[in-house]
Amino acid sequence: MGWIWCVWVFVCSGFYALALHPEVYLNMEQRVKRHGYPLEIHPVTTEDGYILNMYRIPHGLKKSENEPTNKSAILLVHSSGGSPANFVTLGKKYSAAYYFADRGFDVWLFCSRGTECQNPRKHIKWDWNNDPEYWNWSFHEVGLYDLPASIDHILNVTQQKKIFHVGYSSGGPQLYALISEKPEYNEKIKLNVNYAAAVLLKEVDYPFLQVLCQLSNLFKNLYGAMGVTELTPPVFYSVLSDLVRKMCADPKWFRLCKVALSSFGSNLSTLMEDDIVELATSVFPRLSVKQATHYMDNVNRGDFRKYDYGKQTNLAVYGRAVPPRYNLTATTVPNAFFYGATDSLSVPEDNQELIGILSNVIYEEELGPSFVHLDFIFAKNASHMLYKPTVKLFKDFDAGRIPPKIVKRSKQ
Ligand SMILES: *[C@@H]1O[C@H](CO)[C@@H](O)[C@H](O)[C@H]1NC(C)=O
Ligand SMILES: *[C@@H]1O[C@H](CO)[C@@H](O)[C@H](O)[C@H]1NC(C)=O
Ligand SMILES: *[C@@H]1O[C@H](CO)[C@@H](O)[C@H](O)[C@H]1NC(C)=O
Ligand SMILES: *[C@@H]1O[C@H](CO)[C@@H](O)[C@H](O)[C@H]1NC(C)=O
Ligand SMILES: *[C@@H]1O[C@H](CO)[C@@H](O)[C@H](O)[C@H]1NC(C)=O
Ligand SMILES: *[C@@H]1O[C@H](CO)[C@@H](O)[C@H](O)[C@H]1NC(C)=O
């Protein structure tokens, strides 16, 4: 038993030497307030009963005397397992949400079902903590229900006809699932900007993940047999998230956290500052089993298809044994692509293949050479490498200067 005691003392000694980032335990409202920006909370109910909380940063740090009433709205969409807080993690100076708000945009932050946004997760009928039905969804449902409810709410509040959509990682597949099923949403978006889109996942360059994805059916069967729909069941979640949060805030451990975090993108990120690690790991990802296995199946197939229920159920649901592809040719909205030269999740080849399929890509930029998946939200350089050219695109659009197709590749 001696070794258990040793481990325990070792771990605890770490916990008592905490040097917490001042924002680790702050919620979104407290963080934004601390940074000096305004924040509104907008509850939105989806067609299938989920009650989401969208955030809005209606203006920048300094509110001008005569704030224009027709500011362009931007919807910033977080990734699966991420949260709207990802867009303010870089603090006052470098965060995407503030960068856009300070440059005259009306910034809205999407909050998908299952994500903790201020108020506990809600559904008109189901309890997220007790009802397995609550977690019975994938990026398909997020795209089909959460996204249109959020977009329509913005259009209603701002009385505008179209918004800018910025999707990070799974923001891509969600939007294309929506457009495939409800093409009328092409008309509600001025421009869609993809940050490291996780749509086609053919070339995912991450051996561990590829092996893991082979186990998709095993996951489905195991979780199905237990009747569990959330990837990290609530019993484990609070323990695990607390452990990760404390460990990563500890100087002794946080290097390990940084390695773990950045290896998720591929090569160690050289662009992520150390203090971001604590904040980035302060919200442990929360995923549904259906969402995770949907991605896994698409990685296995190297294709962008609807959820695979297994042959029998597929026949009943889709009228065919193999789930159908999403209809990418239904996309008419203009698209811009930013991807990292060394991102092993959203790899350049997959982005380029998708760009070849879509009919209306006006801008493509490869960031590099060391820009990886998490750098889109956690690298201090993102503000000048990524948010700056994004704002230029938005301003050009609003001024009617729709650029001819531009392709930029990483220089070094
Ligand atoms: C807002 O209205 C002003 C005055 O009509 C116009 O010049 C400007 O381009 C509009 N801005 C946007 C973002 O539509
Ligand atoms: C999840 O939804 C599918 C249909 O979309 C249904 O067949 C299945 O029974 C549901 N499972 C749970 C646990 O609610
Ligand atoms: C639009 O906003 C008005 C006023 O806030 C509200 O009464 C109405 O229900 C909203 N409509 C939709 C479709 O959300
Ligand atoms: C995909 O969308 C396009 C444009 O709306 C349509 O012409 C085409 O028939 C669709 N394809 C499928 C397979 O539904
Ligand atoms: C990682 O970085 C090394 C050197 O910087 C490079 O040669 C290699 O291609 C990179 N790997 C990936 C997966 O991008
Ligand atoms: C990151 O930003 C710093 C300072 O703004 C700059 O010196 C450096 O070259 C940038 N790195 C990359 C890879 O762009």
Image (cartoon, grey):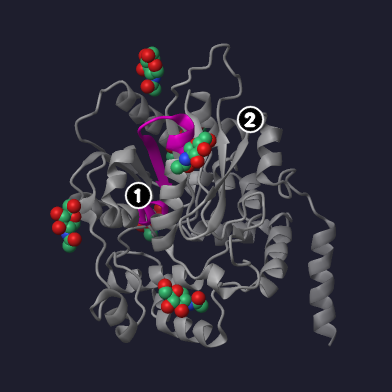
Mark number displayed over residue 4? none
Q: For the point 53% across and 25% down, which residue is it?
A: 102
Tell me the mark number nearer the camera, choosing from 2 and 1.
2
Label 1 C-beta lies within 8 Å of the nearest ligand 5 atom: yes
Q: How would you rate the neighbour count of disc 2 (Cα within 10 Å): few for under 14, some for 14-19, many for 20 or more? A: some
Identify the image quadrant of the C terminus. top left
Q: Position of residue 353 (x, y in %)?
A: 22, 55
Please say whether residue 161 is one of the residues in the magenta stretch. Answer: yes
Q: For the point 43% across and 43% down, which residue is it?
A: 151
Please say whether residue 39 is one of the residues in the magenta stretch. Answer: no
Mark pair 2, 1: CA separation = 35 Å
Q: For the point 63% across and 30% down, which residue is it?
A: 38
Helix or strand or loop: what does disc 1 sit on?
loop
Image quarter where ligand 1 lies: top left
> Is 319 left or right of 21, judged from the image as shown?
left
> Is 160 left or right of 318, judged from the image as shown?
right
Give the amino acid at mark 2.
Pro
Give the amino acid at mark 1.
Ala
Q: What residue sits right under mark 2 in the picture? A: 38
Q: For the point 45% across and 48% down, which residue is it?
A: 149
Q: Residue 49 versus residue 36: which sits nearer the camera?
A: 49
Q: Residue 89 versus residue 250: which sits nearer the camera?
A: 89
Residue extent of the magenta highlight: 153-175
Q: Is residue 61 above or below residue 354?
A: above
Helix or strand or loop: what does disc 2 sit on?
loop
Q: Residue 359 versus residue 344: which sits nearer the camera?
A: 359
Mark number displayed over residue 341? 1
